[in-house]
Amino acid sequence: MPDPNLTIGTMSVQTRCSVPTIRYYEKIGLLPRPERASNGHRYYREIDLKRLTFIKRCRDFGFPIEQVRELTDLFEDGDRACVEVRDLAQFHLDEVRAKLAEMRELEASLAAFVCSCDTACSGGLTKDCVIIDDLATPAACVSATDVSCCAVPAAASSALITKELKRK
C-alpha cells in the first residue's frame, strides 16, 4: 500500500507546486501517474516526490518543458555522462544571457523614451507626446541601423527636435 502521507496535497505543499501543475506534469508524462486508492485519491511514492522536486527546480531555473524532459530522463538514468546535463545547463545559460542583453537594450530604449518625454513634452497633451510619436513611427521610417524592437528608434531624435521647434 502506498504511503498515505504522499497525497497530491502533500506533494503540493512539500514542493510548492500547485495541484493543477502536478496533474499537468502527469498528463504530459513528466511525472508518472500515481497509484489510486479505492476512494480515487492519488498516492505518491518518495521517488515521485524527489522527481517532482527536481522538475519544479528545473522550472524555477527557467528550463523549458522539453529541456526539463531531457533533464528528467538524465535524472532517471544515472549511468549516463554528467556532461550531458552540463551541456543542457550551458545551453540554457547562454539563452538566459542573451535574454538579459535584450532586456538591457529594452531598458535603455525605455529610459530614452522617458528622458525624451521629460525633455520635450512631459506635462503636455498626448497628441504632442514624443513617446507616442516614436511608437507610431512605421518600421520602414526607421533607419536600418535602428531596426530592432529594443533599439531607440531613429524617430526619437527627430520627434524630439520637432517638438522643441514647435515650442519655440
Image (spheres, helix red, strand yellow):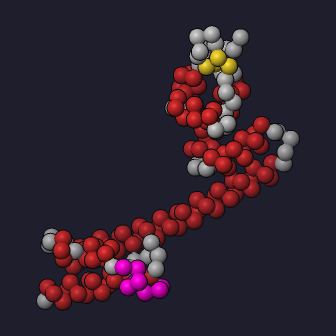
Q: Which residue is rendered at x = 59% and y = 15% of the image?
A: 40
Q: Which residues are magenta?
A: 138-145
**Residue 144 at x, y = what percent?**
47, 86
Q: Is residue 23 magenta?
A: no
Q: Which residue is rendered at x = 61% and y = 61% of the image?
A: 95
**On screen, residue 111 above or below 145:** above
* Left or right: 132 as drawn, with respect to 92: left
The quarter in which the C terminus is drawn is: bottom left
**On screen, residue 106 above or below 6:** below
Q: How many marks?
A: 0
* Left or right: 12 as drawn, with respect to 70: left
**On screen, residue 126 above or below 138:** above
**Residue 34 at x, y = what percent?**
67, 23
Residue furthest to the right in view is 79
**Residue 153 at x, y = what percent?**
38, 79
Main SS of the magenta segment? helix
User: Can residue 110 be seen by looking at this rendering?
Assistant: yes
Q: Which residue is rendered at x = 77% and y = 37% of the image?
A: 76
Q: Quadrant of residue 124?
A: bottom left
The quarter in which the N terminus is drawn is: top right
User: Can residue 53 be seen by looking at this rendering?
Assistant: no
**On screen, residue 77 above or below 3:** below
Q: Quadrant of residue 122?
A: bottom left
Q: Which residue is rendered at x = 38% and y = 85% of the image?
A: 141
* Left or right: 2 as drawn, with respect to 41: right
